[in-house]
Image: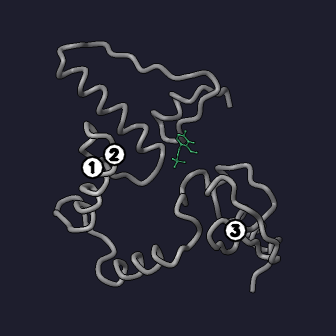
C-alpha cells in the first residue's frame, strides 16, 4: 500500500501542477463519506464540486457502470449508440418542457464553451453580427482557452 507522502511526491514529479491541493490523498468514497489513505473520514459537502450528486460509488451506479463497461467502453461520435440516446431522452423528460436536446461533453469547461458556441450560432442565424459574451467579475468558468478568458479572476 502506498502512503500519503509518497503519492504527493510522485504527483509533483509526474503531473503538471494545475491545482493548489490540500495535503490529503482521497482514497475511497461511500455515499456522502470519503476516506483518505490514512483512514480518516470526511463528509463530502460539495459532492466532488457537484460531480457525484448521486453519492460516492452507490451500488446501482457501480452495477450499471460495470455492465456498460463490460459491454462497450467507447463509441466514437461517428456512430449512433444506445445509452447516449436513451439518456438524452430521459433528460428531455426530466427537464422543463422546452429543454428537449442534450449536448454531452466531458467537463464543465467544455459545457461552458459548448454553451457559448450554441449562443453564437443562434445569434448568427438571427442575422446578428458582433455578438459579445458577458462574464461576471470573480467568476470561474474553467481552464480551457475560451472558458479561461471568460473567467473573471486575475490569477
Ligand atoms: C461554475 C463552473 N464552471 C466551470 C467549471 C469547470 O469545470 P471543469 O473543471 O469540469 O472543466 C467549474 C469547475 O469547478 C465550475 O465550478
Task: Give yes or no for contact between labels 1 and 2 (Cβ–Cβ under 8 Å).
Answer: yes
Which image quarter holds the C terminus? Answer: top right
| Distance Cα–Cα, label 2 vs label 3 | 29 Å
| Distance Cα–Cα, label 1 vs label 3 | 31 Å
- Residue at the spot of label 1: 92
Residue 77 lies in what quarter of the image? bottom left
Classify mark 3: residues with Cα within 10 Å, few (<14), some (14-19) or many (20+): some
Which image quarter holds the N terminus? Answer: bottom right
Q: Of label 1 and label 3, which has the lower sequence position?
A: 3
**Residue 95 got which mark?**
2
Secondary element under disc 3, as helix, strand or loop, is strand
60 left or right of 115? right
Could you tell me residue 124's position as x and y percent? 21, 21
37 left or right of 128? right
**Residue 33 got which mark?**
3
Q: Residue at x 47, y 36 (%)?
A: 145
76 left or right of 54? left
Q: Of label 2 and label 3, which has the lower sequence position?
A: 3
Could you tell me residue 99's position as x and y percent? 28, 40
Amino acid at each position: 500500500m502506498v502512503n500519503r507522502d509518497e503519492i504527493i511526491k510522485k504527483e509533483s514529479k509526474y503531473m503538471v501542477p494545475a491545482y493548489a491541493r490540500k495535503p490529503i490523498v482521497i482514497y475511497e468514497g461511500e455515499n456522502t463519506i470519503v476516506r483518505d489513505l490514512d483512514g480518516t473520514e470526511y463528509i463530502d459537502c460539495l459532492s466532488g464540486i457537484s460531480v457525484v450528486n448521486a453519492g460516492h460509488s452507490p451500488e446501482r451506479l457501480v452495477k450499471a457502470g460495470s455492465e456498460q463497461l463490460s459491454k462497450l467502453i467507447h463509441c466514437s461520435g461517428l456512430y449512433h449508440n444506445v445509452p447516449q440516446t436513451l439518456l438524452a431522452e430521459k433528460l428531455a423528460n426530466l427537464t422543463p418542457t422546452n429543454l428537449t436536446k442534450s449536448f454531452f461533453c466531458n467537463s464543465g469547461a467544455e459545457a461552458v464553451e459548448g454553451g457559448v458556441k450554441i449562443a453564437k450560432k443562434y445569434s448568427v442565424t438571427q442575422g446578428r453580427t458582433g455578438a459579445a459574451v458577458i462574464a461576471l467579475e470573480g467568476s470561474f468558468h474553467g481552464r480551457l482557452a475560451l472558458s479561461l478568458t471568460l473567467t473573471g479572476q486575475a490569477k
